[in-house]
Image (spheres, rainbow, N blue to C red):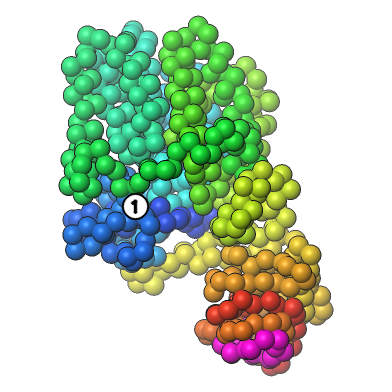
Amino acid sequence: MSRRAAFWTFLVVLTLLLANGRAIGSGDTNAVERTAASLVRNRSFLIESPADDPFTRPAGAGRISIYPPLTAVVAAPFFALFSVFFDLDPSGIQIAGKITAALLSSLAMGLLALIFSRRVLPQRAFEAAVLIGIGTSIYSTSQALWQHPVVVLFVVIGLGALEDVAARARIPTRRSAVIAALAISLAAAARPAAIPMCAVLIAFLVTRARDHIAAIAVAAGLPALAVAAYNQIWFGAPWNFGATTTGRFMAALPESVPGLLISPARGLLVFTPFAVFAFWSLMTRARINPFARTLLIAVLVHVGFVACWNEWHGGESFGPRLLTDMVPVLFFFLPEALFSQASAVTTLALVSAAIQFLGGWTYDYRWERLHQRGKEFDQALWSWKDGPIPFAVREGVAIQGVPDVDGRKLRLRLHRFVLTDVAGSTIEGGSETPRVSGAPLFSDVHLERGARMEAGFVRMTHPSDALAFRATRDGLLALRISGRLDGLIAVDGPAGATEQPTNGPFDTILSVRVKTGDVIAIRAARGDLRLARIEGNLSR
């Protein structure tokens, strides 16, 4: 029964992680994914990357990721299997990264269900593990190949073995001690930010398995030596990691501590409200259980360490990404909390899952484009009105990816749908969202990337900023567009882009032939566009 619970946990979590049909990565994940692809194609850690890529460094005849290589090494077999069927081109690499991350996280949750089954009924173990997999930042960090899925997997393996050591009744203790030491050390090797938390777990292991200290030292030391050798080869010294740390600590204190817990933009208790019960369960058992006490200390150490990092908010991500590594530790006694307060825990867990799904189907970096790269980012981190969650609800744009196979090429075509859609033929600037009126010639009107409402205009300052909509009829769509732009306006349609230079105020007509369902986007190919009005007319 426990193995069945583990299998179904793996299957359910994997299905839900892949259900949105798209990868949600960043510059961090691109570097890791390209490294995994290079290991498959070239048997090398070197990758091709622009000289100004902040996530890589020059090395030899190419560039190398600033991140430790273990995540890419673990991912390489999955990428190799993917390459049997599809090309590892840029799109294929991104898809392979998403699938790999989802598989690793689902495997971790399946193992967690197996571990939980030692203490509770398999049904309760299944419920707890699934809720952790879809109701925490494990969900959001499994949308691309972050380092977190690998860390979570190794932490889960280490916790299972460490629990055996703590019990001292299960045999063999030596085997469990070695597994715990190796797994926890591998977690630290995959992500240096997890080192303080892992050090707490290793310290507990040493105190509980003194008879096996030599075996523990060897098991824990091997990954550390491998990382040291890698750093020596590529970064010049065993203690040098690729990512610079100079000047990147302590400046955000003390705001970062409550920020990690209750910030509307990144707070753990905001994005994962059932973490309250995880904390409560862990603290309750910590009073009488040395192992639970160790886990509580590990959680506090990890939160404290991340809070010292100036970029505690985790950059471009949905929710408290940098706390993901501690999720298995924090939620290790969730089954007991489910047993004692099932209704309340389940309710908040489902709210947590709904928040994660909201991110999975809406998050596209738009919130960061509007806030993080502007001077108001510090204020935006604490805005309850305009945090990522209310922002996503207010925008109401769901994004569903659909696989598109062309021979060995695999793509994910993204379809955006406005949940509170109003069809029309005229779009004008509004207060918070564009105003749509007139005959229903187009639908799903929405803003993309950094496009924003400003003084009654839709303002677009980057070539990726756009106002987009979907055609509702077939024919030649003539768009009368007015606004102000010193540059080049573009209309992207199914046949490509139509561009026209403008100089100052303009009122122009651009036409595009469409079929029902085609997506049209208006943007500035060059310059700062203030879009006032779009009026469409359709002819057969």
Name of the residue lying farthest toward the right? 438
Of helix, strand and loop, which one carries label 1? helix
Is residue 184 found left or right of 95 in the rendered image?
left
Residue 12 belongs to magenta span: no
For the point 68% across and 25% down, the residue is 343
Tell which of 107 and 526 is nearer to you.
526
- Measured along the vertical axis of the image, is residue 141 above or below residue 194? below
Q: Amino acid at mark 1?
A: Val
Q: Which quadrant of the figure has residue 80?
A: bottom left
For the point 18% across and 16% down, the residue is 214
Name of the residue lying farthest toward the bottom? 540
Q: Which quadrant of the figure has residue 134?
A: top right
Counting labels gives 1
Q: Is residue 65 visible?
A: yes
The boundaries of the magenta stretch are 499-518
Q: Is residue 99 visible?
A: no
Residue 507 belongs to magenta span: yes
Image quadrant occupied by the C terminus: bottom right
Residue 524 x, y percent position in the rendering: 59, 78
Q: Which residue is mark 1?
A: 32
For the point 20% across and 46% down, the residue is 236
Residue 364 x, y percent position in the rendering: 56, 58
- Measured along the vertical axis of the image, is residue 468 above or below residue 52? below
